[in-house]
Image (cartoon, rainbow, N blue to C red):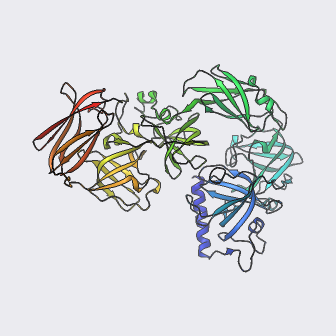
């Protein structure tokens, strides 16, 4: 169960109970002053808010962040420190490290209009409405660059992990520290600690008192081997279901008698790569290009520090976009302990900054496979089938424009209307401004058939960029989901993750009320239908167009439930054109095409009365290559697009073609020039 959903259930239950009990407001007549963190944490205090009570404001200095997407936290503590001086500020779906907040460790903030709650035994403040998309708390920065509250330096006995440890309770949410010598006694690599990246440390003076170190919640820190000597460990105290723990904020919170580790590497540009270490390292060793090598045997031309725990390498490797590259580091020296890497460590990444189209491009090997047959999936996705989830690929960097948002899912698109130029991005660590280009660092997976960029650790705003114009397509093009081994058909895979427009389609089925939450549309003269989905509740409430009406529909092509569907961005993407069969104003048969020449020709025709219509596209030899309308239509005005798709699924060659319309015995033809794709 996800962190966000678990929190939602737990906190919603607590707030409901508090609501029934008529939650107390603070300040009030008995407690007229602003509530402090100590008053919230200390149950013996006269003005202690109960679970579910609301406080007008609580202030503290930020000491750390929980960066996990869709369930972000910031930890705040009173400047003077001391018992009961720290607490978790649960920010719901907002990463306060990025815009619009841009908070940093050392900022003093005030959280206003908040409720008190308990999550897995830890106290926190959060929005009173418990709305993950639109929390109603108010948070503001008072000052920046403040000194952090002093660490409480304790012993392994005082800070042991047992839930019965009444001493540690007063330092929940506070900065705490233990000085060594300490020894790693057990790690999560052998299981039994309830999470990854966890380990227990003991002191020779009190070997029975184990302290739980959490390297997952606030950072990613792999457990050192059993028996490793530790000079000191510090972080934020916390209580969870298992017991008390110290949460590392980064690798600098633990001083090991071991060399640093290479933890990540990924491209920033086509010729620069960031390498990340698990702790601060010396500038001299990290900027020495002789300490790095590439698997491609390319060159590392320069290295400059980014902060104190990462370096940016300028490389020249001659590889193509999408090739795998591996960087190896050795000889890097830890800043705190002075230990030097003597064993090379490597990290593999996808070369270059990829476009959405490069990520969405089908893997030729999976297309050609027979067991399972013909899977259209990204070559950068992790192993598994078409509908596998959680199997992510190698670390990669993508740059594309944020064009649509549906809750925690964004759709990133390349400029123009390139084939396969869109891809979903799940839960980036920032709110992505629509109409801006973003550089994202993450991994690719196939999430129930849809290519998705996930596990995103970096979201850098590259500035304003135009959202691609929706491409005019037919229902069959957007909905087609057949094996396309030769990749010649225009199908849903070509438009997945992209904005499209269905020019004049008819509402043929409605599902009201939810949970089915959508409706079906069909082309005027074809039986093909596609589902229009209210994805993540964007259309609130759902108001489907009237059954039988024609609409112009715009949205993103999304794959879910074994089929392609259209997801509008809002009600402006659904334009009701009224009832089919409205007589055109000029009351006569007409047929025209514009633009001409074109890559995407739009044919318009008027029917003064009901008619059997047939519109075909013919080459110069008189052979019909496509049909764009066929069947009985009521009187009205219609449009059909032709983008070179032939009846056999291939794309026509550039050249001269003729469009012939037959309606109730009348016949008219047009000459059009197709410019090719």
Q: Residue furthest top?
A: 297
Is residue 392 visible in the rendered structure shown here? no
- Left/right placement of residue 94 relative to residue 505 reads right
In the rendering, at what x and y percent does residue 133 appear? 55, 58
Q: Quadrant of residue 374?
A: top left
- Left/right placement of residue 342 relative to residue 628 reads right
**Who is closer to the viewer here, 192 or 412?**
412
In the rendering, at what x and y percent does residue 397 appear? 58, 35
**Who is closer to the viewer here, 299 or 90?**
299
**Who is closer to the viewer here, 303 or 534?**
303
In the rendering, at what x and y percent does residue 621 appear? 19, 24
Q: Quadrant of residue 647?
A: top left
Q: Residue furthest front?
A: 586
Q: Residue furthest bottom?
A: 29
In the rendering, at what x and y percent does residue 501 appear? 36, 45
Q: Residue at x 67, y 44 (%)?
A: 196
Q: Residue at x 11, y 41 (%)?
A: 666
Q: Residue at x 30, y 28 (%)?
A: 652
Q: Residue furthest left?
A: 665
Q: Give above or below for 424 relative to 380.
A: below
Is residue 351 visible in the rendered structure shown here? yes
- Left/right placement of residue 500 relative to residue 263 reads left
Say how many tags the image has. 0
Q: Quadrant of the C terminus?
A: top left
């Amino acid at each position: 169960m996800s962190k966000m959903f678990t929190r939602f259930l737990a906190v919603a239950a607590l707030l409901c109970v508090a609501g029934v009990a008529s939650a107390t407001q603070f300040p009030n007549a008995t407690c007229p002053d602003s509530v402090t963190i100590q008053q919230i944490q200390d149950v013996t205090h006269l003005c202690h808010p109960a679970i579910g009570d609301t406080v007008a404001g609580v202030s503290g200095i930020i000491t750390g962040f929980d960066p996990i997407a869709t369930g972000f936290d910031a930890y705040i503590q009173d400047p003077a420190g001391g018992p009961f001086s720290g607490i978790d500020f649960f920010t719901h779906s907002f990463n306060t490290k990025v815009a619009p907040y841009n908070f940093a460790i050392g900022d003093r903030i005030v959280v206003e209009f908040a409720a008190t709650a308990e999550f897995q035994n830890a106290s926190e403040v959060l929005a009173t409405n418990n709305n993950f998309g639109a929390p109603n708390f108010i948070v503001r920065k008072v000052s920046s660059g403040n000194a952090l509250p002093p660490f409480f330096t304790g012993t392994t006995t005082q800070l042991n992990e047992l839930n019965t440890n009444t001493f540690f309770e007063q330092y929940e949410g506070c900065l705490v520290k233990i000085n060594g010598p300490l020894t790693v006694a057990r790690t999560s690599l052998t299981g039994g600690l309830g999470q990854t990246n966890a380990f227990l440390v003991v002191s020779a003076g009190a070997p029975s008192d184990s302290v739980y170190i959490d390297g997952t919640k606030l950072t990613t820190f792999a457990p050192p081997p059993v028996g490793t000597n530790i000079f000191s460990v510090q972080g934020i105290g916390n209580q969870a279901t298992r017991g008390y723990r110290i949460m590392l904020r980064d690798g600098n919170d633990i001083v090991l008698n071991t060399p640093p580790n290479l933890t990540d590497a990924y491209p920033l540009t086509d010729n620069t790569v960031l390498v990340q270490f698990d702790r601060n390292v010396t500038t001299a060793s990290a900027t020495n290009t002789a300490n790095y090598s590439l698997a491609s045997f390319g060159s590392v031309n320069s290295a400059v520090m980014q902060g104190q725990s990462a370096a940016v390498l300028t490389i020249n490797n001659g590889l193509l976009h999408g090739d795998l590259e591996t960087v190896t580091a050795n000889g890097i020296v830890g800043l705190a302990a002075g230990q030097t890497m003597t064993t090379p460590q490597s990290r593999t990444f996808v070369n270059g900054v990829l476009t959405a189209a490069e990520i969405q491009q089908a893997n030729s090997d999976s297309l050609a496979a027979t067991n399972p047959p013909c899977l259209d999936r990204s070559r950068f996705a992790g192993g598994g089938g078409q509908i596998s989830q959680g199997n992510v690929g190698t670390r990669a960097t993508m740059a594309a424009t944020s064009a649509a948002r549906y809750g925690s899912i964004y759709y990133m698109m390349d400029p123009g209307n390139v084939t396969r130029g869109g891809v979903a991005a799940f839960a980036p660590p920032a709110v992505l401004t629509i109409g801006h280009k973003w550089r994202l660092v993450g991994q690719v997976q196939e999430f129930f058939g849809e290519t998705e960029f996930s596990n995103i650790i970096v979201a850098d705003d590259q500035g304003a960029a135009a959202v691609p114009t929706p491409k005019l397509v037919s229902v069959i093009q957007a909905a087609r989901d057949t094996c396309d081994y030769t990749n010649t058909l225009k199908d849903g895979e070509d438009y997945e993750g992209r904005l499209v427009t269905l020019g004049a389609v008819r509402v043929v089925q409605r599902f009201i009320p939810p949970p089915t939450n959508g409706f079906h549309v069909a082309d005027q003269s074809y039986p093909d239908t596609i589902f229009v989905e209210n994805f993540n509740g964007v259309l609130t409430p759902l108001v489907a167009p009237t059954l039988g009406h024609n609409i112009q529909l715009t949205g993103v092509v999304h794959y879910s439930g074994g089929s392609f569907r259209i997801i509008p961005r809002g009600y402006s993407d659904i334009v009701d054109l009224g009832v089919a069969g409205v007589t055109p104003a000029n009351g006569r048969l007409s047929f025209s095409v514009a633009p001409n020449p074109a890559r995407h020709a739009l044919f318009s025709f008027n029917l003064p009365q009901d008619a059997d219509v047939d519109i075909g596209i013919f080459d110069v030899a008189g052979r019909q290559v496509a049909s764009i309308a066929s069947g009985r239509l009521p009187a009205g005005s219609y449009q059909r697009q032709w983008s070179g798709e032939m009846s056999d699924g291939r794309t026509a060659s550039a050249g001269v073609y003729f469009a012939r319309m037959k309606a109730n015995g009348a016949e008219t033809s047009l000459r059009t020039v197709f410019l090719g794709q």
